[in-house]
Amino acid sequence: MEAQRKEKIPQGGDGWQYEPKWDGFRALVFRDRDQVAIQSKAGQPLHRYFPEVIEATLALPAKRFVLDGELVIPVKGRLSFDDLLQRIHPAASRIEKLAQQTSAQLLAFDLLAEPYGRGRVRSLAGQPLEERRERLEELFASVPSSAPFHLTPATTDFDIASEWFRKWASAGLDGVMAKRLGIPYRSGERDGMVKVKRFREADCVVGGFRYSSNGKKSIGAILLGLYDSEGRLVFTGHSSTFTAAERKELVSVLEPLKGRNAFEVRVPGGPSRWASERSSEWVPLQPKLVCEVRYDAFTQARFRHGTKFVRWRPDKSPRSCTIDQVTAEASPALGTLLRA
């Protein structure tokens, strides 16, 4: 079941159930007695990367079920997407080591099939959301508290959902999901579920740019940097959300500032985990321009999904653009939320 992206949390209308949007890997967990499979949203097998989740699943009292949820790794009071990414590794020995050092957990939010009678299973996908939720809660009533499984919180109270959105970003909450009450599980469809991501702003140094693919008559992207605790300018990503007219205007703004490479950490042009682009063709700038950008996640010293340009900040000093703007503090609220 997919989700539409919206700017605001919906309320009223047909009625909604709200859940936290976690910063992890969406996954389906299938159990059939002594067999367990974990599948990504795209249908790719994940079970070899999370042996501790397989082991814990086999220890559950229920012998047959299908869960929809999120694989996460809590580290020091918040969810760590970086540690989750480290699991996608070809070496089994490396995976086993990481599974012991930073154990994964499953945050379950839907039940698509449940045990029924002696050795049978029945699908719940055609049942309304509220009934599936009731069945999910019944299944989790028998899950030991020591197991790496959590029933994700859910509420129909808009004010509570809004509080999650405002309060618990530092714990790894990625936003809020809103699901329509009274509808079945609509696999592959987006009309029954809405995701509202939490966006933040940061002031960044413009340390370089790339020309558009059509030549030097317009700018394709600006390259962003933040100063670390040692006073080094770290390349943290890019912004390319400009209109055609703005791209042309940027040429006269940026070209006069051409200079030597100011980035001292993670120089642009290297391999990117997030994009297929591998071009090393970029133009360094003197670190004098500051802009405000909007972003949704910052991991591994990089804006994960690129950024949206908001405005220029001539009132800001480049040296004031430090990386502590985007590094969240650990939050004791994570444990509270998982126990809700």
Image (cartoon, rainbow, N blue to C red):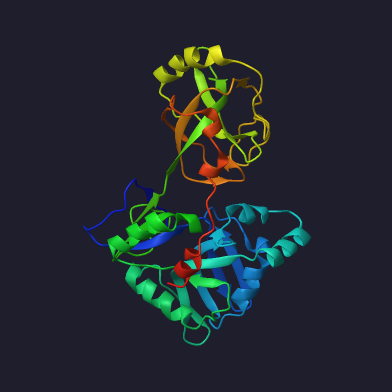
Q: Looking at this view, name the residue that lies furthest to the left.
A: 13
Q: Residue at x 58, y 72 (%)?
A: 148
Left or right: where 78 falls relative to 3: right
**In this picture, is 125 found above or below 11?**
below
* Residue 303 showing in the rendered view: no
Quarter of the figure that contains the N terminus: bottom left
**In this picture, is 94 found above or below 128?**
above
**In this picture, is 8 found above or below 20?**
above
Nearest the viewer among 72 and 118 is 72
Left or right: where 55 falls relative to 189: right
Nearest the viewer among 92 and 272 is 272
Nearest the viewer among 323 and 65 is 323
* Residue 221: % across, % down: 52, 25
Q: Residue at x 50, y 81 (%)?
A: 120
Q: Residue at x 54, y 12 (%)?
A: 256
* Residue 125: % across, % down: 40, 68
Q: How many marks?
A: 0
* Residue 173: % across, % down: 46, 57
**In this picture, is 304 found above or below 67?**
above
Q: Looking at this view, name the residue that lies furthest to the bottom.
A: 118
* Residue 276 showing in the rendered view: yes
Nearest the viewer among 258 and 181 is 258
* Residue 161: % across, % down: 34, 60
Quarter of the figure that contains the C terminus: bottom left
- Residue 213's quadrant in the figure? top right
